[in-house]
Image: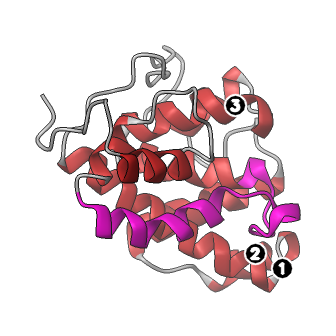
Amino acid sequence: MARILPIDPPYHPSVEYRLKAMMGGEGDVEPLKLFRTFVTNMPFSEAMGPLGAYFLRASDRGGPSYDVRTRELVINRVCVRCRCEYEWGVHVTIFKKAAKLSDDQIHAIVYLDHTAPCWSPKDADTIEMVDCLHDTGHLPEALFERLTTHFSEKALIELLMLNGWYHAISYFANGSEIGLEDWAMRFPKKRCSVRPQ
């Protein structure tokens, strides 16, 4: 059972408004358990909403300058490193197609590292960025220089913050023991020929 119980419907109008905003205006989709937990503290959910929405907004709608695939590689790898199956499952289920992630790449992001043969140089550097930040809190100079060949300075600012944001989301989901969404993917089973990281 969740340590902090999410709010269940029927929702107070102010809560319903906030949940719709957090769900991107989708009124006919059940709000995520994560969001229904956040709104148990409305001032907090209102404060965090704009930045969370910014990270997921398309660049042509005033959002970040990174592409969807890079965003999802960062989010999925952060969630894997934090062992946050909840947020990983939500993102892989919703954004797998938009991010053009193959089943092999989904498996690799859980069990392999940036050296897996399924990654392009840009993908590999993105995954290595996540791992270095997770393990050390820093980026080696050589890796940072490679990242500048893939991303603008603006995108790097956004990506560094995206790493930290999804650490915070993972810590919250894990610490509060939010139950998994019924419809979301689970971490895949490890293939016999794969070495765990």
Question: In the figure, residue 102 lies in which quadrant?
Answer: top right
Q: Nearer the viewer, residue 165 or 127?
A: 165
Give residue 34's mark: none
Image: magenta residue range? 41-70
Disc 2: which residue: 155
Percent x, y of residue 190: 46, 19
Q: Nearer the viewer, residue 97 or 2?
A: 2
Asked if residue 53 shows in the view, the reply is yes
As helix, strand or loop, the secondary structure at mark 2 comes to: helix
Disc 1: which residue: 152
Please state the total of marks drawn on the protein image: 3
As helix, strand or loop, the secondary structure at mark 3 comes to: helix
- Is 90 placed above or below 76 here? above
Q: CA distance from mark 3 to mark 2?
A: 21 Å
**Could you tell me which residue is drawn at 41 percent across and 49 percent down?**
81
Type of the residue with mark 1: Ser
Name the quarter where the N terminus is drawn.
top left
Percent x, y of residue 70: 73, 54
**Could you tell me which residue is drawn at 38 percent across and 56 percent down?**
169
Give residue 96's mark: 3
How many other residues sit within 10 Å of disc 1, few (<14), some (14-19) or many (≥20)?
Answer: few
- State the residue lying farthest toward the front: 13
Look at the numbered discs 1 and 2 and tell me whether their residues touch, using CB distance below 8 Å: yes
Type of the residue with mark 3: Lys
Query: Is 86 positioned to the left or the right of 94 in the image?
Result: left
